[in-house]
Amino acid sequence: MFNIQGKVALVTGARRGMGRTHALLLAKQGAKVVITDVDLAECELVADEVRTAGGDVACFKMDVSNKADVDSVFDQVIVKYGRLDILVNNAGIYQSKAFLEMTEEEWDRTIDINLKGYFFCAQRAAKEMAKNKWGRIVNIASIASGGVGIGIAGGAHYTASKGGIIGMTETLAVELAPLGINVNAIGPGAIDTPMADPKQMPAGMLDAILAGVPLKRMGRPEEVSAAVVFLVSEEASYVTGATLYVDGGWLSA
Ligand SMILES: NC(=O)c1ccc[n+]([C@@H]2O[C@H](COP(=O)([O-])OP(=O)(O)OC[C@H]3O[C@@H](n4cnc5c(N)ncnc54)[C@H](O)[C@@H]3O)[C@@H](O)[C@H]2O)c1
């Protein structure tokens, strides 16, 4: 099960954190993986890991908030592989700022990367996937995305972007279903990556978070990547428009 042999998969924000483990696990399951991020040298280090494990990989510097960058990289991927089957929209930033002090520039930067960047990449990817009447788009949202989610003090721009991702996912599932493209979201809880590094949290913050998490620990990036692999596989053929929460039970508590 979950064999994606020969599929071409592009992951954004893949130089570290969850993007890195998504790339490694997709390659392990047989996909040809395209690693993209703002820092090419760090992408190359992840690419080396994929190659060492026997995987097929390419790297590109790509700022998801820059449409020219996105178009250029997608063009190069199509020249190299002739197709694109899987997109994992993962790139994101979290820059804590009190709502009453947040500037327009700070709001725009988060929305440009976390939401507009997902739009740019999903649109380009869907145009390629439609040619083969098969595709999978996975959008990484968050448990902090509205609805029954959690609010984060200092994260008005972030939570707005993540809620937007879930709304866009549900709409794309409807629009792209006739083209053979399934679109889903994942809502991670507290995952141990540089973005949520417990060593950099204020004293007591991790304990306060974990008090509300039934599994009583942070998630490992690989545990989110396993959900990515499921959603991009043939086995997820009847799953579209869903948000899968990988949160140790946080939202259920
Ligand atoms: N770590 C958590 O607890 C957590 C929880 C919920 C959701 N998420 C989401 O998971 C995703 C991955 O985050 P992570 O925890 O691995 O954090 P991370 O900071 O380790 O990874 C984010 C990656 O996105 C890249 N990136 C930033 N701006 C970019 C841009 N303009 N273009 C391309 N790439 C860019 C960064 O360089 C970095 O490699 C993000 O969308 C994040 O919002 C994380």
Image (tube, rainbow, N blue to C red):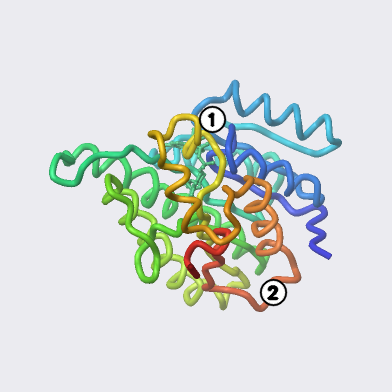
Category of crowding for the residue at label 1, using alpha-carbon neighbours closer than 10 angstroms: few (below 14), some (14–19), many (at least 20):
many
Crowd class of label 2 (few under 14; some 14 to 19; many from 20; radius 10 Å): some
Q: Quadrant of residue 15?
A: top right
Q: Nearer the viewer, mark 1 or mark 2?
A: 2
* Above or below, 136 relative to 115: below
- Determine whether the beta carbon of the residue marked 1 sits less than 8 angstroms from the nearest atom of ligand 1: no
Q: Describe residue 133's horizontal placement relative to residue 51 as left or right.
A: left
Q: Position of residue 250 (x, y in %)?
A: 50, 62
Name the element at disc 1: strand
Label for residue 172? none
Query: Residue 30 vs residue 185: left or right?
Result: right
Residue type indicated by callout 2: Ser
Q: Which residue is labeled 2 in the image?
A: 237
Q: How many marks?
A: 2
In the rendered view of the protein, which quadrant contains the N terminus?
bottom right
Distance from disc 1 to disc 2, alpha carbons, whole Å, reads: 31 Å
The residue shown at (39%, 47%) is 114
The tag earlier along the polypeptide, 1 or 2, is 1
* Residue 130 sits in quarter: bottom right
Q: Which residue has dot 1 on it? A: 61
Figure check: 110 above or below 58: below
Q: Position of residue 39 (x, y in %)?
A: 52, 25
Query: Element type at marker 2?
Result: loop
Give the residue drawn at x 42%, y 55%: 119
Residue 19: percent from left, percent from top? 59, 42
